[in-house]
DNA sequence: CAGAAGATCATCT
DNA sequence: GATGATCTTCTGT
């Protein structure tokens, strides 16, 4: 378990849609003084150029500045007055793009996650949603700009899921939402995705 | 400086 | 399915 290594930085230095697809099945790992926490990524969403929903669509600001930085950088932003969301910055320096991690399947450190989330939370709900997983992993703004190719917080290659599970998902969307905004969403066929009822 | 919206979640009906 | 929580960030004046 501790032999898992981070992906190469070149993994993130690619078009954000490709990275969002390839992050399905990869591992999110935090391994530091707080212990080991590990989970499989099952749901992602891509943000980048030509996307009005992207935080950087109207240029660089203090908040979105990490999106312009080195691929593999963590962009962790605060929203709705109480929630933190984790992104992996993609594409070359100066090109704002990032993948939001929307849901993960807990694999290791489940008790630590339950301490962070609440004693009555079932395994399925520990990390099912972008703000839930940051809470479960103990991530917030103090970790903004962390290196996701680093050692104590990183993305690992994990087991390769069948691409079919990603490409045929009923809720995959590379297209347009009802309001006309782009929808760049990937999910595995898993009970740990954020919207499923199952 | 005020106002609105927001890459959400827990809780309730 | 609806609503409240809670506050930062951005925009317009």
Image (cartoon, coloured by chain):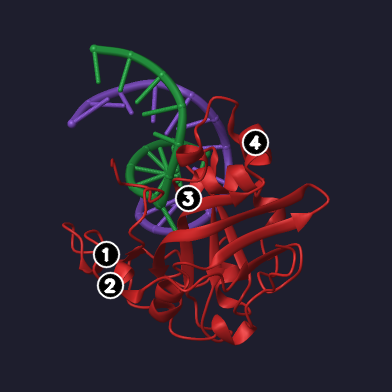
Chain colours: A red, B green, C purple
Residue A115, given in percent of the width and then of the height, sits at 66, 33
Viewer-side label of 1, 2 = 2
Nearer-N-terminus badge (1/4): 4
**SS assignment at label 1:** loop
Q: CA distance from mark 1 to mark 3?
A: 17 Å
Image quadrant for the N terminus of chain A? bottom right
Left or right of residue A99: residue A49: left
Q: Give the left or right position of residue A105, taking residue C12 as reference.
A: right
Does residue A62 appear in the picture of this structure?
no
Describe the element under mark 2 as helix, strand or loop. helix
In the image, is A163 to the left or to the right of A26? left
The quarter of the picture where residue A21 lies is bottom left
Q: Position of residue A46 (x, y in %)?
A: 40, 69
Query: Which badge, 3 or 2, is on the more N-terminal residue?
Result: 3
Q: Does the residue at mark 3 contact the one at mark 4 (Cβ under 8 Å)?
A: no
Chain at numbered mark 2: A
**Same subunit under labels 3 and 2?**
yes
The disc, 1 or 3, on the residue closer to the chain's N-terminal end is: 3
Q: Which residue is mark 4?
A: A116
Whole-number angstrom distance, CA of label 3 to CA of label 2:
21 Å
Image vertical order of residue A107 relative to residue B3, above or below: below
Question: Alpha-carbon neighbours of circle 3 within 10 Å: few (<14), some, or many (≥20)?
Answer: many
- Whether residues under marks 1 and 2 lie with C-beta atoms below 8 angstroms apart, the answer is yes
Which numbered tag is attached to residue A132?
none
Q: Secondary structure at mark 4?
A: helix
**Precedes in sequence: disc 1 or disc 2:** 2
Q: What residue would you read off at disc 2?
A: A167
Judge the density around disc 1: few (<14), some (14-19), many (≥20) Cα neighbours within 10 Å. Answer: some
**Residue under the point 65% across and 36% down:** A116
Q: Sequence-wise, which precedes: disc 2 or disc 4?
A: 4
Residue located beneath label 1 in the image: A172
Residue at mark 3:
A130
């Amino acid at each position: 378990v501790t032999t898992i290594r981070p992906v190469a930085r070149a993994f993130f230095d690619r078009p954000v849609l490709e990275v969002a697809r390839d992050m399905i099945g990869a591992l999110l790992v935090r391994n530091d003084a707080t212990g080991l926490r590990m989970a499989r990524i099952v749901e992602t969403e891509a943000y980048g150029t030509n996307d009005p929903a992207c935080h950087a669509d109207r240029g660089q600001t203090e908040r979105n500045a990490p999106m312009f930085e080195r691929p593999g950088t963590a962009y962790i932003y605060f929203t709705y007055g109480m929630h933190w969301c984790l992104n992996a910055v993609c594409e070359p320096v100066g090109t704002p793009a990032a993948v939001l991690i929307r849901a993960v399947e807990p694999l290791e450190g489940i008790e630590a996650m339950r301490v962070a989330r609440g004693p009555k939370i079932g395994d399925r709900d520990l990390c099912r949603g972008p703000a839930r997983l940051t809470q479960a992993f103990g991530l917030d703004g103090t970790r903004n700009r962390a290196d996701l190719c680093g050692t104590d917080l990183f993305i690992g290659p994990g087991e390769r899921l069948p691409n079919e599970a990603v490409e045929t998902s009923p809720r995959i969307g590379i297209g347009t939402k009802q309001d006309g905004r782009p929808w760049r969403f990937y999910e595995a066929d898993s009970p740990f995705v954020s919207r499923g009822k199952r």
